[in-house]
Amino acid sequence: MTKIAVDRSTKYVKAVRVVLKELGHATNAEIAAQVREEFPNVSPTTIHRVTSRLFAHGEIGLAPSKDNNSMRFDYNSAPHDHFVCISCEMIRDAVIGKEARENLERSIGLDCSISGSITISGTCKKCKAS
């Protein structure tokens, strides 16, 4: 792929960046719904191509998928952890410190080490209140 193709920034690419920055984490369907407010005729295929290209070039990351296995993209492409609400599927970035990771590794045993991100599930404040 040529550098021109990689750097190409269409109105849809710009719109996806803005929407994902605003939402933080989103599926292609969620991104498309927001982008359609400005560009009503944008196709799901276009959104998929844009997010795939942005992910392939490290501009966006992947977040834990939704319960229906829909892929969720993350505006924050740096390695990090997440909290996911088991009721409403709200997702937030989380920082699980070195000490907590070491405690988890000790509890796992067998000299295992955590090398990737961790996803914690639970119930968010809003769902707890309802």
Image (tube, helix red, strand yellow):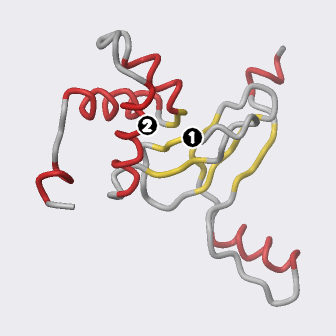
Residue type at mark 2: give it.
His
What is the residue that sits farthest to the left in this orientation? 4
SS for dot 2: helix
SS for dot 1: strand
Q: Can you tell which quarter of the image residue 90 is in?
A: top right
- Which residue is disc 1 drawn over? 72
How far apart are the two marked residues, 2 and 1, measured between alpha carbons? 11 Å
Mark carried by residue 120: none
| Residue in view at x 19 percent, y 33 percent | 10
- Which residue is disc 2 drawn over? 48
Name the quarter where the N terminus is drawn.
bottom left
Residue type at mark 1: give it.
Arg
Q: Nearer the viewer, residue 51 or 121?
A: 51
Q: Would residue 71 be found to the left or right of residue 5 on screen?
A: right
Q: Are marks 2 and 1 in contact (CB under 8 Å)?
A: no
Q: Nearer the viewer, residue 16 or 117?
A: 16
> How busy is the neighbourhood of tag 1: few (under 14 within 10 Å), some, or many (20 plus)?
many
Q: Nearer the viewer, mark 2 or mark 1?
A: 2
| Residue in view at x 74 percent, y 25 percent | 88
Instruction: Tell me if residue 56 comes above or below residue 30 in the rendering.
Output: below
Residue 127 on image: x %, y %: 79, 22
Q: Would residue 56 be found to the left or right of residue 105 on screen?
A: left
| Residue in view at x 40 percent, y 49 percent | 60
Q: Nearer the viewer, residue 83 or 98?
A: 83
Residue 123 on image: x %, y %: 80, 33
Instruction: Tell me if residue 93 comes above or below residue 130 in the rendering.
Output: below
| Residue in view at x 24 percent, y 32 percent | 14
Q: Earlier in the sequence, mark 2 or mark 1?
A: 2
